[in-house]
């Protein structure tokens, strides 16, 4: 592994070089909303928030994505233009792990070219999480404040400098392009970074033991637990739209004049419309079934299919739920519940 | 350029008064601008506020809603509801920054062919002054 | 001040009744300052009930939220009453639901809680970050006392109250079957300052303001779902035929969505501020709703959610309604 150091004074230059050669995504404000957006013009000051409100999944899996365009009466279709090389800077390890989780989904039985092309052309430069938030529980689901899964380069804030660890070939290419800004890392820098990460890990206050949850969830199918938990659920899409691993989409045709497009848009299993059949029948008729499905999908079905939990412990769903439906609370009740 | 701009005005006319009024203008050979696209509805009270939003989204530069004079409604009180509703709509559109000249409402009775002409002239003139509507047109954003 | 012991005994008594399905109240949440709606079905569950400055949720939404599922043949619908704890603003939602016949007066039992203002979670979490342990709070002479693990903190309530509470006109429930505690004195007055401030700007500035706000929308529809007045069984946002608003997320569709939402609440919004509280993107939705409230109040002298006998604003009219805008 290649380890270098980047002085914070040179961060501006570092960003400028990256932005010149690639489409550079960094966390930015849109209204009051924090999301990863392409850097346009001059960014006055770089500020990496603990976590963005909208997870960086929307770089690869945009909320609205054109699949192809068509014309009324015609038989030709045209595809959106190829994506350019991109870099995502300042992604947190949990969100990067989420991308690795989504990879397995989008390359499952049929490869999804829209998603995978973008993944292939994008380098993820992560930033180790030294100040975990109150609802972080990444260590419980296989991650950690400096987890490298899904990342190409990991930066760790050492105070004056960033420790830069190259993790993949893609990361190596990016490193080459910024070589002259980097310094050699000293032996004790690595130790410092390790110490900082350890400290951060110890600051994570919430946890859950996920052993056996996968098997237990289907057994609790008819448990009154779900009714009680979903009583207060509003049925909104916050927990799913803003989840870094949620990946459901809906396909819609839109027409304007004689031109049209087929696009995919995010969909949420918490919406009534999600499972509604054309006949009017709805197999998940109430919030009870929808909440049950969300939990089952993340901690049971996905594990069955891919061998990993579809949750990275970023805490967004807990932070943002307006009625305090707390996934850790749900799981601990699941663990406690007798069958 | 601005002189050449021909606005596209969508007009919702009630079947009993305003549509008949416009018809009268036609049969009386009253000349007026062709920028108005008329959509006939049964009553001005039938006009859903979403029609207005949707028209603006799909490329209208101005919207006109026209019904019977108060008290003349074929359905007794439909236009009273419309008046309340679109009084609010006008304020809402203005508040989000849409040019207030784009949204108009009028009372035109079946015998007012000449008033219809005046209304159209005024509405088209206002839409022309306001210019092409771009604020939340669909315009194939990110296609 | 609401006496908690009294609240619990009333709650136990209420849910023990045969004709009561459950009581909806608040309980301490799973961490920090969070509070969660609490559905009390058995008397022993009443022990968890609280009423404090942390109780922000408007529980009136839960009167209209449950799905009306088809029943198996021979099964009678559950016609038992629902008991509900309300603050001043929540009670207006209940009144408005009664006005619109969304619920019937005899289907509910309203337990009124005079309220001295609830917190703005964002302001409080900023002041006391990273609270993992549950924190309780109480009102005390114009201050709010937070019982933090490291000791009590007293803060003047103006500093942490939700914005809507600073101008609250109805701290006491306008409708209730029984009241917990004495009425509190009204401290606020609604002058719609924030709306006037925006009105004073020029149209282009107003549009840039809203364009940025609407663009940040993620279309999670939490503002719709949390709203006690949004309970159409068939919502235009869920419809595909006709598709009023496309599912794609862009400035045009988002603007149409927010205008439609605001307009559907014209003359109905009771300004509980829930939409803005739940919005993950921080869109200033109440600024939009309150504009319409202002117009309805100033031009039509109508205030929704006060009188259960009144007629809904948009399905009534006065012959002398203003028409100076009509050509």
Image (tube, rainbow, N blue to C red):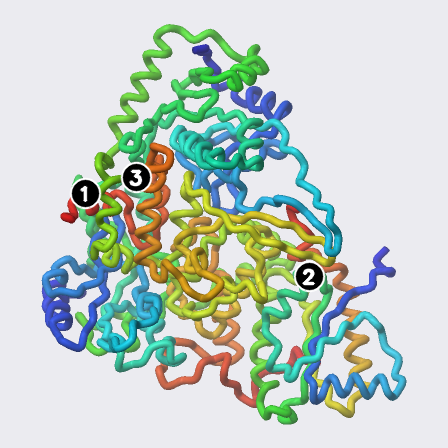
Q: Residue at x 53, y 60 (%)?
A: C258
Can you say whether C256 is above or below B47 in the image? above
Q: Which mark is residue A135?
A: 3
Please name which of the two marks, 3 or 2, marks the residue nearer to the observer. 2
Q: Disc 1: which chain?
A: A
Q: Position of residue A329 (x, y in %)?
A: 23, 46
| Residue located at (18% from left, 59% from top) | C50
In the rendered structure, the answer to whether residue C293 lies left or right of residue C66 reads right
Whether residue A249 is visible to the viewer of this picture, yes or no, is: yes
Q: Which residue in the protein does label 1 denote? A: A335
Q: In the rendered view, does A4 fall on the left or right side of C26?
A: right
- Residue C138, quarter of the rendered image: bottom left
Q: Residue at x 64, y 69 (%)?
A: B52
Q: Chain of mark 3?
A: A
Q: From the viewer's perspective, is residue A67 above or below residue A41?
A: below
Which residue in the structure is indicated by mark 2?
Answer: B58
Question: For this rendering, which residue is in front, A64 or C14?
Answer: A64
Q: CA distance from mark 3 to mark 2?
A: 44 Å
Q: Which mark is residue C108?
A: none
Query: Given this view, does label 3 or label 1 mark the residue nearer the observer?
Result: 1
- Circles 3 and 2: CB atoms closer than 8 Å: no
x and y, in percent, of residue C174 in the image: 30, 76
- How many badges with numbers are in the image? 3
- The vertical placement of A10 against B73, above or below, is above
Q: Quadrant of residue B39?
A: bottom right
């Amino acid at each position: 592994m290649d380890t270098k150091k980047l002085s914070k004074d040179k961060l501006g230059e570092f960003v400028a070089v990256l932005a010149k050669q690639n489409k550079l995504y960094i966390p930015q404000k849109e209204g009051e909303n924090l999301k990863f957006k392409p850097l346009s013009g001059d960014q006055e000051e770089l500020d990496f928030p603990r976590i963005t409100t909208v997870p960086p999944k929307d770089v690869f899996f945009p909320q609205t994505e054109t699949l192809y365009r068509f014309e009324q009466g015609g038989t030709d279709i045209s595809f959106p233009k190829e994506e350019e090389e991109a870099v995502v800077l300042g992604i947190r390890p949990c969100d990067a792990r989420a991308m690795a989780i989504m990879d397995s989904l989008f390359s499952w039985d049929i490869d999804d070219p829209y998603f995978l092309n973008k993944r292939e052309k994008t380098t993820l430069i992560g930033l180790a999480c030294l100040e975990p938030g109150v609802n972080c529980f990444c260590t419980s689901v296989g991650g950690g404040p400096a987890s490298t899964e899904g990342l190409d380069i990991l930066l760790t804030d050492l105070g004056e400098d960033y420790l830069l660890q190259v993790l993949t070939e893609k990361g190596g290419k990016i490193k080459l392009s910024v070589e002259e800004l980097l310094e050699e890392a000293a032996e004790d820098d690595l130790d410092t970074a390790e110490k900082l990460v350890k400290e951060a890990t110890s600051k994570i206050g919430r946890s859950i033991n996920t052993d056996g949850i996968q098997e237990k969830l289907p057994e609790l199918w008819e448990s009154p637990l779900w009714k009680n938990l979903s009583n207060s659920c509003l049925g909104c899409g916050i927990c799913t739209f803003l989840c870094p691993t949620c990946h459901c989409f809906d396909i819609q045709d839109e027409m304007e004049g004689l031109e049209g497009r087929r696009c995919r848009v995010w969909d949420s299993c918490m919406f009534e419309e999600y499972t509604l059949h054309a006949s009017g029948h709805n197999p998940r008729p109430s919030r009870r079934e929808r909440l049950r499905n969300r939990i089952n999908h993340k901690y049971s079905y996905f594990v069955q299919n891919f061998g990993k939990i579809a949750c990275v412990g970023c805490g967004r769903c807990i932070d943002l739920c307006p009625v305090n439906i707390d996934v850790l609370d749900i799981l601990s009740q699941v663990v406690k519940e007798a069958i | 350029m601005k002189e050449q701009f021909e606005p596209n005005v969508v007009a919702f006319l009630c079947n009993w008064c305003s549509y008949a009024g416009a018809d009268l203008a036609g049969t009386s050979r009253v000349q007026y601008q062709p920028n108005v696209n008329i959509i006939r509805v049964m009553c001005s009270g039938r006009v859903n506020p979403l029609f207005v939003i949707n028209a603006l989204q799909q490329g209208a530069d101005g919207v006109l809603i026209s019904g019977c004079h108060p008290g003349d409604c074929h359905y007794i009180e439909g236009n009273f509801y419309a008046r309340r509703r679109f009084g609010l709509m006008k304020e809402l559109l203005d508040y989000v920054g849409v040019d207030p000249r784009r949204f108009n409402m009028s009372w035109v009775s079946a015998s007012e062919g000449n008033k219809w002409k005046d209304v159209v002239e005024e509405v088209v003139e206002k839409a022309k002054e306001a210019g092409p509507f771009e604020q939340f047109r669909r315009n194939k954003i990110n296609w | 001040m609401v006496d908690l012991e009294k609240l619990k005994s009333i709650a136990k008594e209420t849910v023990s009744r045969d004709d009561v399905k459950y009581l909806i109240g608040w309980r301490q949440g799973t961490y920090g300052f969070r509070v969660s709606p609490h559905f009390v079905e058995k008397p022993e569950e009443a022990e968890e009930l609280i009423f404090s400055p942390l109780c922000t949720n408007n529980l009136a939404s839960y009167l209209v939220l449950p799905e009306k599922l088809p029943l198996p043949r021979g099964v009678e619908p559950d016609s038992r009453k629902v008991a509900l704890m309300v603050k001043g603003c929540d009670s207006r939602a209940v009144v408005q639901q009664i006005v619109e016949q969304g619920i019937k007066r005899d289907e509910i039992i309203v337990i009124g809680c005079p309220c001295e203002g609830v917190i703005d979670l964002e302001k409080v979490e900023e002041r006391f970050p990273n609270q993992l342990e549950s924190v309780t709070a109480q009102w005390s002479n114009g201050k709010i006392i937070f019982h933090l693990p490291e000791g009590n903190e007293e803060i003047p309530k103006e500093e942490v109250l939700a914005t809507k509470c600073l101008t609250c006109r109805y701290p006491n429930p306008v409708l209730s079957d029984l009241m917990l505690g004495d009425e509190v004195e009204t401290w606020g007055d609604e002058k719609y300052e924030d709306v006037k401030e925006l009105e004073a700007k020029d149209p282009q500035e107003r549009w840039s303001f809203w364009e940025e706000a609407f663009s940040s929308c993620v279309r999670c529809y939490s503002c719709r779902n949390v709203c006690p007045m949004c309970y159409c069984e068939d919502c235009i946002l869920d419809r595909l035929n006709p598709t009023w608003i496309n599912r794609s997320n862009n400035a045009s569709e988002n603007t149409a969505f927010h205008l439609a939402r605001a307009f559907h609440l014209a003359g109905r919004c009771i300004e509980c501020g829930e939409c803005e509280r739940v919005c993950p993107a921080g869109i200033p939705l109440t600024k939009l709703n309150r504009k319409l409230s202002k117009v309805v109040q100033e031009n039509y002298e109508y205030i929704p959610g006060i009188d259960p006998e009144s007629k809904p604003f948009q399905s009534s009219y006065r012959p002398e309604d203003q028409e100076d805008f009509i050509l």
